[in-house]
Image (tube, helix red, strand yellow):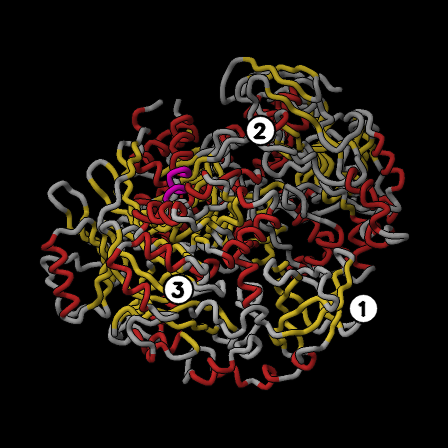
Amino acid sequence: MNSSDTCHIEIHGQDRVLEFAAFHWPASGFDPAAWPVAPGGAIRDATDQACLLHFAPHRWLAANPTNEMEQQLDSAAHAGAGVKLDVTGKWQRITITGPGAVRLLASAIELNATLDGRDCAAVTLFDCPAIIARRNGGFELWVQSSYSVDFLATAGRFRAMLQHAHE
Amino acid sequence: MTAPPLRRGTRLGSGTLSFTFDGRRYTGQVGDCAASALLANGVRLMGRSVKYRRRRGLLGAGPEEPNALFTVGTQAQLIPNVQATQLLLREGLTLRSQNRWPSLQVDLASLLQAGGGLFGAGFYYKTFMWPSWRSYEPLIRRLAGLGDAPLACDLPMPATEHLDCDVLVTGAGPAGLAAALAAARAGARIVLCESEPLCGGELEFERGRIDGQDSDSWLAAMLTELDRLGVRVLTSTTVVADNHGEFIAHAEPGGLPGSNTVYRIRARTMIAAAGALERPIIFANNDLPGVMLLGAAERYLARYGTAVGRDLVLFANHDRAYASAQRLLVGGMRVRAIVDARTDAHSAVGLSDGNALQSLKGSLATAGVEILSASAVTIAEGGRAVRAARIAPLASGGHERRISCDTILVSGGWSPALYADLHGSGAHAYAPELGSFVAAAQSDWHIHAGAANGRLDLAAAMSDGHAAGTRAAAAAGATGDSGSPPQARGDPPPRLAPFARSPCPLVGEKRQFIDLQNDVTVADLRIALAEGFSDIEHVKRYTTLGIGTDQGRSSAVVGAAILAELKGESPAIVGISRSRPPYQPVTMRSIAGFHHGDAVMITRRTPLHDWHAAHGGVLEPMGLWMRPRFYRASGANAADAAVAEARRVRAHGGIADSSTLGKLEIAGPEAAAFLDFMYLGKASTIRVGRSRYMVSLREDGMVLDDGLVLRLAEDRFLATTSSGHGTHMLSHFEHYQAARWSARGATVTDLTDAWAVIVAAGPQSRSTLAQLLGAAWQGPLAQLGHMDFTAGRYAGQDLRLLRASFSGELAFELHCRPAIAARLWEALNAAGLTPYGLDALDILRVEKGYLVSSELNGQTTPLDLGMEALVISSSACLGQALLDRPAFHEASRPRLVGLRAADGRAPFLAGAQLTIDAAPTRPCGYITSSVYSPTLGEWLGLALLARERAAEGATVMARDPLRGRNTPVRVVSPVHFDPTSARMKV
């Protein structure tokens, strides 16, 4: 096996996840410094994990939000900018790391084009709806929970096949 | 068989490999393709034609090969129809010829060719009609087809890679390389696909000079620079389809799936530089083994060191034949004659390098090559293979000649490769100087270059490639300097005179083969015209011209030219037929990708999936979801289990997993108005804490879906959708939110996976929940009215309790977070509520007359389904205006009714047609759902019946010819059980 083709797929526990949907953009109630304003933008925590992702137009994902972030979303909602929704359970967080991560995900999408100038995007990976974000040494995914078993099975098949091809 | 006169080794490697062909062991050299290895072993018979089973040898040396198709591999890794010319030899390869029985040498079905005169185009359509097609089908199916489809497949999954680029260049010949270099220098991102294992294309044969270097040196420097510029070069990779900007390319190193990769390439511009395909000239018996394309002979010699024969006759209509003859002579073959369909005057006089050509002719004559101008090969003689060529002058009065030879090499010119353009209905124009078609109008996103653009000489091809690369880069926004075009010098332009077929008496046209794979002859084209099929597309379908695995590469243009001759029209008027992707054969396994075996379709799983699977749940797909149909513990078979489960729910209670229901949260100050628009009935009048059954319509007034809408707060609603329609309803809502409600105060969010739903139904459901959920829920459980809901906490998580029923029993929906779904489910089960599946739910809902997808089938209006009250209550929802169409109010429109057997006992099944009486008259309706009701002890049904026949008490006939049943049934109310709903409102 070529070490450049290895990658690690890790499934994480169910964190609290919120979505924020804006009625229109730009809107009052948004602090541009605290929000990823441009679609595809993301704010990261100290561990480089994306925690507030502008994953689709007018729509943000807050993964495992801090109190401060939740207050920020509440403020925006109270200001009439949009609505905050608790979607805990909707998304399964998965990380794919290692030198082979790009090649594995290239089996499903063209990563460079998808994430060109962006930190995150809503995509379809192996027929499964997901949100993808870059992180150090790999990618962070939020795959819609009901699809996650099949997603992992398909990604695992591609990973095995790619590694076998280089043995 | 002719022994090969020389074997110099292949260009691609050295060493020896062994392989078998039809069970016999052979050896070849590393770098050989299967065709070259067999040729080197003296094998010339490589296949049989599809229709007449005529003996066939190699025609070409590339993807144009129509004859040498092999079945490769064994058992579950069997692949039929692999072109021997594309298949790289590997150790232990097992090859088998096709379309023969019992052997390639002796094929009993070849006796069919004795009836060649009978089996012309259209023979099958006209002949196999009496007593019926079925009488002949088994035999014809055994004889027909190309190879045997494998009965199992164990081919590995192909790798997939998605690529994005500014410019995709297909073909790494001189023009493609020049295009890629120009575009890359300008700063564009390039992917370059080459179907051959090595780049260079015709530079392999044509020894030109480019930018002052020999072609090999230039090629090496070029590839280095492309690498430096970041060009992604994919060799052994063929673009097989153009899906409107997404190009599918298959990499099959060695020409055989195994370690293959499917590339999905999104490109802003595609430069088609796939070269041109040499086409044959048609003459009688031109299908004999030993008749080959001239360029193929050169390729076998240059690349594989293999001579295609000893004594050659060349038959062409252009100047290049003379240079080719010289190279073949140098290669050790004896060229007996060059038969040139042109006159001397046409080929030399007035041309700038006419002297060079005359000099070449002189040198060939000195070497013993006879040059016959204004002549044509009229017949290839020989039984099993070519023995001689009969040659006649084209002008009247000359004498026919016979020259002994073992190989006739033909070249009727080159046809630009236009596959993708023809598929996309791109405009094409006839170019008389080529005798073929070129792309007429070329957009910035689809450019042809080089030979694919009709530029057949090296200098023009490279200049054209450079211009195409520059243009494509500019179109992609790359503004760098693309440099100056390469200065090249190679063989002069071929200067051909179009010549498609040799003169032939009418009777001989049955042996003038145009499409070798499908045995389409000139006589077949005449028949097609006589039958009235004059358009090129109709002729293609009637005669099967060009529909084989080779996609008409060797036959389409020449077929069009001959059709033009027979019609007395110009080829420009006749045109050329379209090609279809894949332009190169690919395995079904490659097309399937990861959608294979268990992964044939992606599936969605509820949080309780594992519980169902572990407890005997028989899961079946509903849309993408997997849902339990019944539980094995409930009965010996599906029917018994469903009846037992339904009976338990009515008698005591049960639980069902309804997590698959779509759940859309609509929020914002205008959420109510949005839902008033999306649903029949008024969501805005629902009180907070209440829910309502609502129906959404399509734009045309047909019912799209139904479900409950819960008002969570003044500005928040939860709309549930049916399981199968969940994703459709989401996109439907999102479309109208974006298109009609953009920037207004309403958002749509899919919460389907955020909430699991457990239904507890039956007389004991309330008491069981009270016992389980604890004191905090006692009050709400006692006070919740029908269609009310409340929210709270259970096990530290959110829980919503909705009193609603789809079974006709007292029932509650528990909307909980997925994390506690299994715990809640197991607790309910332990408390005595056993699970029931979809089959039991079907029984319960048909008893109550509730609808599912059989009735909401996209062809029913709310008026058909008895929802007049909903229509009246609505103001102006989507689709409502069209409900006023007169056609929706006619007596023939369907009406939802209930059915019971007239005798109270006989079964009847969904799908049966309803007629007025037992006679097979026009149906007046059909049964949408039927169940055996354990509660009522008889079969019940729902049906859509013409309104004029839908009066309760009427009797109609349920005709079920597929199952051989005719059952008189009585029209009743759709609500078979508990019409006052007393049971669910307790």
Mark 3 lies on residue: B720
Answer with the quarter of the image where residue B690 lies: bottom left
> Disc 1 marks which residue?
B920
Q: Earlier in the sequence, mark 3 or mark 1?
A: 3
Label 1 chain ID: B
Three-letter amino acid code of the residue under disc 1: Pro
Secondary structure under tag 3 reads: strand
| Quarter placement of the N terminus of chain B | top right
Q: Position of residue B147 (x, y in %)?
A: 70, 34
Residue B117: % across, % down: 88, 45
Q: CA distance from mark 2 to mark 3?
A: 55 Å
Please report whichever mark, 2 or 1, sits nearer to the chain's N-terminal start.
Answer: 2
- Residue A150 among those drawn in magenta: yes
Q: State the extent of the magenta-drawn residues as a range.
A: A148-154
Look at the numbered disc 2 and give the secondary structure of its residue.
loop
What amino acid does circle 3 point to?
A: Thr
Q: Is residue B491 above or below residue B604?
A: above
Residue linked to disc 2: B87
Residue A156 on image: x %, y %: 39, 34
